[in-house]
């Protein structure tokens, strides 16, 4: 894969190495005996990191599906961070969500996610 303009050679090599390491870690997951929810959490963690590396390398990354509202896990994939980060940002007020009641699921507007993602990128 070609090195994007503006990305130094050493950083490019580090990103490619991390990308290959993450792919190997995902391939290794099915051979490990893990509880299903732990395995799913690891897969999401690795996939989110891969999305961040692909964006830095200038490769196509999965885009958001066409809808207006996202639940917490979908918002995390859209932003390329973990679910815990999304919840932490919501609690601190960086990211706004809507709820039907205090116990209900959190829903994030696409405009809000785009606003936060633009802050994350330099």
Image (cartoon, helix red, strand yellow):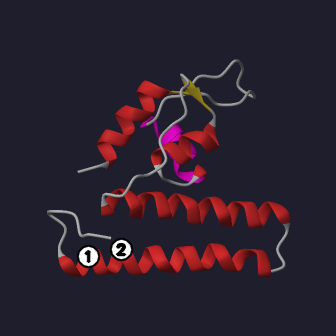
Q: Main secondary structure of the magenta part?
A: helix
Q: Position of residue 56 (x, y in %)?
A: 32, 61
| Tag 1 secondary structure | helix
In magenta, the rendered stretch is: 84-94
Nearest the viewer among 8 and 93 is 8
Q: Position of residue 74 (x, y in %)?
A: 60, 41
Q: Which residue is mark 2?
A: 15
Nearest the viewer among 1 and 54 is 1
Mark-to-mark CA distance, 2 and 1: 6 Å
Image point (22%, 63%), residue name: 4
The stretch drawn in magenta includes residue 118: no
> Based on the displayed image, in which of its 4 quarters is residue 45 positioned?
bottom right
Image point (36%, 56%), residue name: 55
User: Which disc number belongs to residue 11?
Assistant: 1
Residues marked 2 and 1 touching at CB (< 8 Å): yes
Residue at the extreme front: 1
Location of the N terminus by quadrant is bottom left
> Based on the displayed image, in which of its 4 quarters is residue 34 positioned?
bottom right
Q: Please give left or right for residue 102 compared with residue 97 in the image.
A: right
| Tag 2 secondary structure | helix
Q: Please give left or right for residue 118 compared with residue 17 in the image.
A: left
Q: Where is 61 relative to 90, above or below?
A: below
User: Which disc number belongs to residue 93?
Assistant: none
Image point (53%, 58%), residue name: 48
The stretch drawn in magenta includes residue 93: yes
Quick one: label 1, few (<14), some, or many (20+) residues within 10 Å?
few
Q: Please give left or right for residue 18 compared with residue 2 in the image.
A: right
Q: Position of residue 66 (x, y in %)?
A: 53, 27
Q: Position of residue 30 (x, y in %)?
A: 77, 75
Residue at the extreme left: 6
Q: How many marks?
A: 2
């Amino acid at each position: 894969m070609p090195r994007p303009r503006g990305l130094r050679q050493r950083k490019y090599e580090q990103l490619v190495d991390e990308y290959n390491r993450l792919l190997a870690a995902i391939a290794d997951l099915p051979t490990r005996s893990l509880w299903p929810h732990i395995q799913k959490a690891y897969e999401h963690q690795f996939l989110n990191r891969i999305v961040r590396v692909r964006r830095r390398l200038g490769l196509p990354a999965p885009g958001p599906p066409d809808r207006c509202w996202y639940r917490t896990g979908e918002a995390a994939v859209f932003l390329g961070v973990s679910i815990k980060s999304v919840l932490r940002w919501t609690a601190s007020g960086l990211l706004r969500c809507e709820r039907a009641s205090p116990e209900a699921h959190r829903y994030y507007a696409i405009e809000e996610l785009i606003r936060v993602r633009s802050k994350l990128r330099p």
